[in-house]
Image (spheres, rainbow, N blue to C red):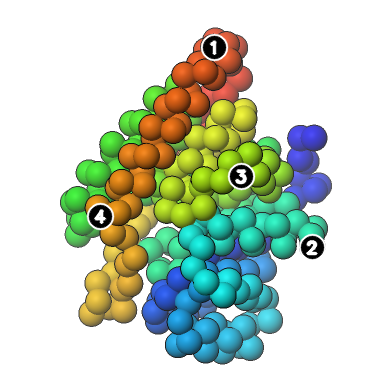
Amino acid sequence: MKPSINDFRPLILIPCYNPGRRIETTVRDATQADVPIWIVDDGSDEETRRRLAALESDHAELRVIRHETNRGKGAAVLTGIQAALERGYTHALTMDADGQHPAERIPAFIEAARQRPEAMILGRPVFSEDAPALRVQGRKISNFWANLETLWGGIGDSLFGMRVYPFEPLVRVMRQTHWMRRFDFDPEAAVRLVWLGVPAINLDAPVRYFDAQTDGVSHFHYARDNRLLIWMHLRLLAGFLWRLPRLLRRRLRGSNRDTTHG
């Protein structure tokens, strides 16, 4: 069933794994949006557990769910949305715990989802001049393949994790595969949702990078995570080939046009 505006009940979902002190700033900034905040702690260490417990006691709108072991970002998101579904929520704005995603853009993302509850709202990163060149240029490759795999179905950026997902189609595609549980979650979710016919709406969002001197924490491992992305795109290309006739028909009907906002 196509969701309606009257059924719209969003929350902010933050998967985290040893995010450092930046999680405190992320939560503080996100509370300004006046939307419930759920954190899924994906097997973090004791220091992070203590930090999250203190945040939960300080913020009534915050709930922490815990994985005892690290399962991956996608697994954390799935745990969060399954628990949120049981409480009547319909959409989640996902954002990283490390402060890279702009909390001031949360209201715009939530409002876009409110107006188009059947769509996914994808953040399109706006990089500053000091953004790591390797990260900026490398994502262009993944974006090319994601757009090819969807026949240019509207994905402005396949890797940016600040998004709003409607629960029903996301849970459906995640239950159809045992992949999408780790770093491959964001691009594969976008591709598979386009395959399902979920429209993509792209919103600009400035990106902030923090180094160790500014309490920045990164769990990105260039070789490991790029191997994971290569394997993911090989799998998606195989899925694309047998879906190609259906995607071509949809493209000709114009039923999944790219919607872009500045």
**Residue to which mark 2 is pinned:** 87
Query: Spatial distance from mark 4 to mark 1, Cα to Cα?
Result: 35 Å
Q: Can you tell which quarter of the image residue 38 is in?
A: bottom right
42 relative to 124 in the view: left or right: right
Residue at 35% x, 36% y: name it.
Answer: 143
**Residue to which mark 4 is pinned:** 222
**Residue to which mark 1 is pinned:** 245
Name the residue nearer the viewer: 90 or 129: 90
Place of residue 39 in the rendered image (x, y in percent of width and height, measured from the top left): 58, 70
Q: Are marks 3 and 2 in contact (CB under 8 Å)?
A: no
Pointer 4 or 1: first along the chain:
4
Q: Nearer the viewer, mark 4 or mark 2?
A: 4
**Residue to which mark 3 is pinned:** 174
Query: Spatial distance from mark 3 to mark 2, Cα to Cα?
Result: 20 Å
Pointer 1 or 2: first along the chain:
2
Query: Spatial distance from mark 4 to mark 2, Cα to Cα?
Result: 38 Å
Q: What kind of residue is marked 2?
A: Arg
Q: What kind of residue is marked 3?
A: Met
